[in-house]
Amino acid sequence: MNGKSIVFFLLVIILLLGGVYYLVNSIQQTAQTTFDSAVAPFAQSNAALQTQVSQLMNPTPTIIVDPVTYIQEVRAWLASKPSNTAWKKSSPPKSVKATSTSCSATLSCSWRTASLLREST
């Protein structure tokens, strides 16, 4: 083998390696494009479903009632009753400390709200 045949042989090897690289790269890109186009409808339906679920489960804002307004409404309700002393008869002794602050929908007040009403009058 002379020098020219070695150079020719190396040139052929480099061209073959370049061709193999080009072939593998084009097959990979074709496979990736095919896979993306096959998966795209599922990705779109998943995104649409996520949007619908988030709209369905969107939490409503919590309305925080102003305590002063609530006490005024309770006072107005108590003033509209024939005898506003009936609720005072059932109040606990002053030594009992109540911790509840909730009132029901019928405006029957808890011990804490009743004591707030007594203190503010």
Image: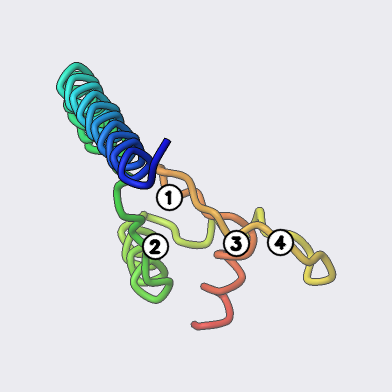
Q: Which residue is mark 4?
A: 99
Please name whichever residue, 27 or 1, is drawn nearer the observer in this view of the structure. 1
Q: Nearer the viewer, mark 3 or mark 2?
A: 2
Name the one closer to the observer, 73 or 87. Answer: 73
Q: Which residue is mark 3?
A: 88
Q: Nearer the viewer, mark 3 or mark 4?
A: 4
| Pointer 3 or 4: first along the chain | 3
Callout 3: helix, strand or loop?
helix
Q: Which mark is residue 107?
A: 1
Q: Which residue is mark 2?
A: 74
> How far across and how far down the image is residue 58, in percent?
29, 42
Q: Image check: 106 left or right of 86?
A: left
Tell me whether the residue at label 3 lies in contact with that at label 2, contact meaning CB atoms closer than 8 angstroms. Answer: no
Instruction: Work out which residue is located at the far right of the displayed protein and give it.
Output: 95
Amino acid on which the number 1 mark rests in the picture: Leu
Which badge, 1 or 3, is on the more N-terminal residue? 3
Q: How crowded is the residue under tag 1: few (<14 C-alpha within 10 Å), some, or many (20+)?
A: few
Q: Label 1's element? A: loop
Snapshot colouring:
rainbow
Task: Give the spatial CA distance, label 2 vs label 1.
Answer: 7 Å
In this rendering, the answer to whether 39 lies above or below 70 is above
Q: Earlier in the sequence, mark 2 or mark 4?
A: 2
Q: How far apart, in angstroms, are the residues tagged by discs 2 and 4? A: 19 Å
The residues tagged by marks 1 and 3 sit, at their Cα atoms, a distance apart of: 14 Å
Instruction: Identify the residue at image location x=37%, y=71%.
Output: 66
Residue 28 position (above or below residue 96): above
Disc 4 secondary structure class: loop
The image quadrant where one finds the N terminus is top left
User: Pointer 1 and pointer 3: residues touching (CB < 8 Å)?
Assistant: no
Distance between the alpha carbons at the discs numbered 1 and 4:
17 Å
